[in-house]
Each structure stands twice: as structure tokens, then as C-alpha cells.
Amino acid sequence: MGFVKEGTTVVVGIIIREDHEKILTEIGFPFPPKVGDSLLPSASLGPVSKVNAEGTYIIHKDRPKEIAYRTVEWTWEQWAGPYDTETQSRLVDVPYKRYPRTRVLPYSAEFTVYERGNSLVLAAPPIEYVPKNEDKLKHTLNLFLEIFGECTNREEV
């Protein structure tokens, strides 16, 4: 990232304003939030928040397909004598072919409320900018942009 020097600690966040009330209550904070309130944003807010809460998979299309199994419930009507049937069901593992995948664990970036001067601030945990943390920093920036449409840097947070 060209705008951050290597070794710098970055804190991504927003200064909480009145117009954030709807978004904050949507993600689970009370309004007004209290200092120390912390939560993991819901996975239902968008694709970035889903990766944040649940993780994702890397699909290896360069490898041969493997057999995987999907569990489904099969339901049918069983004959039970003249003029009568009973509903039956069971769980069945159905095989299918898919490309192999590698599980990527969720980033689990939590939001915490802090006090800064006369303002309340919502921020993610500090991230030291080094090459191995670049994806985590981009993810955290995108998480704020997805939920709030904005974010700010440490000097303002």
C-alpha cells in the first residue's frame, strides 16, 4: 500500500455521528453506544462482512475435481395398506464432483467503541503494517467502507 509506511501501526475507524444511529443499531450496537462496547459485525451485511465472520474458500481450478458429499433430506409417501400412505423421510449423502478447496479462516475484525476528546469513536484493533498483514488491513478498510461507506485514519480516530 503506497499510503502507509512499513512498520506503522494503523487503526481504522470512524467518529460516531448522529447519522450513524441506523447503521450502528443494524450491526448490533445500542444507540448511543457506550465506551467499551465491542462486537463482531453480522455476516448478513454484505460480502466483506460475511468473509469477516465466516471466512471463505480458495477454489483450486488447476487441480482435478474431487468427490464431495452434500446431505439432503429425501421425503416420499410409503404405502401403508389399502387407501392409506405414510410420509417417510431420511437424510442421504449425495456425491458430486467439485474442485478442491482450501479453507481461509475468518478475519474476525471486531469493532470497539472508544472515547477520544468529546467524541465517541468506533475502531477495529490496531494492525501493524507489514507485508504479511496487508490483506488484513485491506479487509478491515473494506469492512468499514461496506458498512459505513467511510473510514478514517489514526490521527482522526
Image: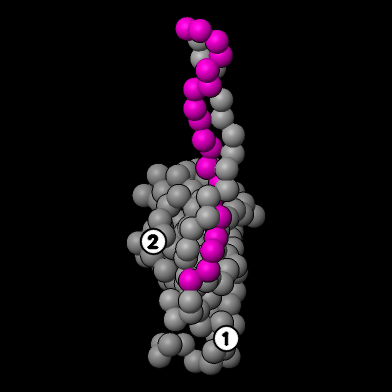
Residue 141 location, x and y as percent?
A: 44, 71
Residue kind at label 1, given as amino acid type: Lys
Examine the structure image and report whether residue 66 is included in the region drawn in magenta. Answer: yes
Residue situated furthest top in the rendering: 83
Residue on which the image places disc 1: 132
Closer to the chain start, of discs 2 and 1, is: 1
**2 vs 1, front mark:** 1
Q: Secondary structure beneath disc 2?
A: helix
Residue positioned 57% across, 68% down in the render: 103
Residue 46 location, x and y as percent?
A: 40, 56
Numbered circle sitting on residue 146: 2
Residue kind at label 2, given as amino acid type: Glu
Residue 68 visible somewhere in the drawing: yes
What range is drawn magenta here? Answer: 65-83
Neighbor class of circle 1 (other Cα within 10 Å; few <14, some 14-19, many 20+) is few
Residue 111 location, x and y as percent?
A: 56, 59
Q: Nearer the viewer, residue 110 or 119?
A: 110
